[in-house]
Image (spheres, rainbow, N blue to C red):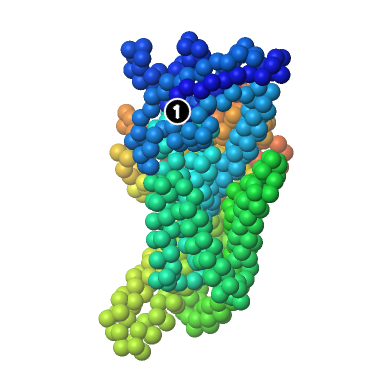
Amino acid sequence: MRIKIKLDPAFSDTLFDLYMNIWAASDVYVDGSLICTFGNTGVNGKAFEEYNPNYKPPLPFNLEKGNEHILAIHFLDFLSALPPYNLKSEMGNGIRSFILITTPEFRKLDLDLTLTFHAFRTIWLTANIILCLLFWLLAFQNRNERNFFFIAVYTTVLAFTIYCDQSIPTPGFTYAFYAFLRVAWAILVSLCGIFSLLLMLRIFKRKISLSFKISLWLIFAAGIALVFFQNVYPLIFELVLIIINYAYYITTSWKTLKGAQWAVIVGIILTFSFGLSLVTGGMVAPENYSLGLLFSTGLFLSSPLSLLVYVAMRFKEIIKEVRENAKQVVKLSEEKKEQALNQQKILQKEVNRQTAELRNTLDNLKSTQSQLIQSEKMASLGELTAGIAHEIQNPLNFVNNFSDVNTELIDEAKQEIDNGNTNEAKIILHDVKENELKINHHGKRADAIVKGMLQHSRSSNGIEEPTDINALADEYLRLSYHGLRAKDKSFNAIMKTDFDESIGKINVIPQDIGRVVLNLINNAFYAVDEKKKQNQDGYEPTVSVSTKKMNGKVEIGVKDNGNGIPQKVLDKIFQPFFTTKPTGQGTGLGLSLSYDIVKAHGGELKVETKEGEGSEFIIQLLSN
């Protein structure tokens, strides 16, 4: 290509810049001299290299004013490997702006406008991506609302459409990628229209008709045509089909629309209003760049923002529905409660019969407690009583719970018998029988607990009998802990056990040894609780009970991590009426009586203590 150029002398003080505005590789000559190259045409023996015309620095282009010059351009181009299979030079602005000779001021203004446009495109894309991610999050968190999933899909396609159409070329931006984006944009535009129409039908709760399906296929076909022809006619055809479908379904659904559905209507109206304003403004006032950016912003954000409003309103409707359902559930619950009360009255006599013995046992237990206070004079009686009550409450709860279950099962059995389902009734009655066995089991368990404590409360008969030391120590550990908890809810401690299972049973007076173990455990809990009240950082009150068999003897150890016993009073702790507790909290007889009981069994009661770290009392008894 050659052209003669003559600069008027009026341009004597004007500077010019030269830009090559096509993807083809070019060599530029002035008066037969090579002044610059764009890409590589291959005349130098090297491989062909396309030229990226985006954001290249200007080339100063200053010629003698008043003289005629010959501007020659040698360019080399190839057909694109992607649709529409034309020359790379024909993409974008095409041959019509093959080369630009401008002033630096004009180029600076053009660059400023371009950067402003790219800034707005970044805002549009960022806003759509954020809304897209938000809708996906809502879709995963609310899987029952299928409309949220379709909203997420539609906004995702919309975000990709904006990216492919408004992507910003960079120095590493190749023509192949540029052409790929153009192909992707053409397809995504049709998909965006298809998903928007599908979403409208779902929100309006309309069925998909045959004519609607045909419209969707025509829109997709127009998108494929846009890929190959790269002109405005397929795009216009798509828009006309979309507008016709929107108009039809909006007008035919107008009377049934309510609540959140109106947000979609507003979004559709705003989107087409901004689109029409953008086209009209481009024809009437193309130089008003700011107005175009404003209309474009409304075009790209109206639809996703209206869907955000729809989601917010839909959540409000869901909350309202949940509240109404909750009222119905409460009403049904009240009715069920009334039925349950009636059923409970039917079996109340049976329950009273099964629990009467337990209530009488509790009354006897109170009397036993009074006798124990008089005979033992132990300060831990209140804690022991509460522990017993706690142990009895557990089987009582089982009795009551299984009784309630039987009430419901009996009614179900009656219903099945009335319906003629005898096999099902037998299965239910079998469950009733199993529950009755459990009620009997837990009733006997409570009876055993009470009998054991009654035996503990009676004065010792001095007769030794085979006793499971491990079970005895574990029982009194729990009784002591629950008793102290009943007296002081703030009390808490860690309990540890380490029992030697090889001990078996040994001959002792269980009432007497039980009193000794209980007294030592009560003292240990008291010691750790006192240390805890000192608010030492990281301190965890712990009481350990262990048993072991060695050298023909059985040892019962009660260990705490309290403050320990001062050495100056260590020799006095087994003396009658000596106590380290404040006045009114101890009689000073517990350790003295415990020492005498262990001696009477031919054993020994020892203590190991370290001031500030804790104490351990060890009961040594003969294993036979």
Q: Residues within 10 Å of mark 1 (few under 14, many from 20)?
A: many
Q: What residue sits 41% from the left and 32% below the top?
A: 88
- In the image: residue 18, left or right of residue 624: right
Q: Quadrant of residue 42?
A: top left
Q: Is residue 59 visible?
A: yes
Indicate the position of residue 183 as horizontal and vertical percent values. 41, 43
Q: Residue at x 56, y 33 (%)?
A: 540
Residue at image position (47%, 53%) is: 233
Question: With 469 as the anchor, is 610 left or right in this view?
Answer: right
Vertical relation: 76 (above or below) 419: above
Number of disc labels: 1
Position of residue 198 measured from the top left corner of the image (x, y, whole percent): 47, 62
Expressed as whole percent of the image width and height from the top left, the position of residue 240 reads: 52, 61
Does residue 207 sit above or below 342 in this rendering? above
Which quarter of the rendering shows the C terminus? top left
35 w.r.t. 87: above or below = above
Residue where numbered disc 1 is placed = 23
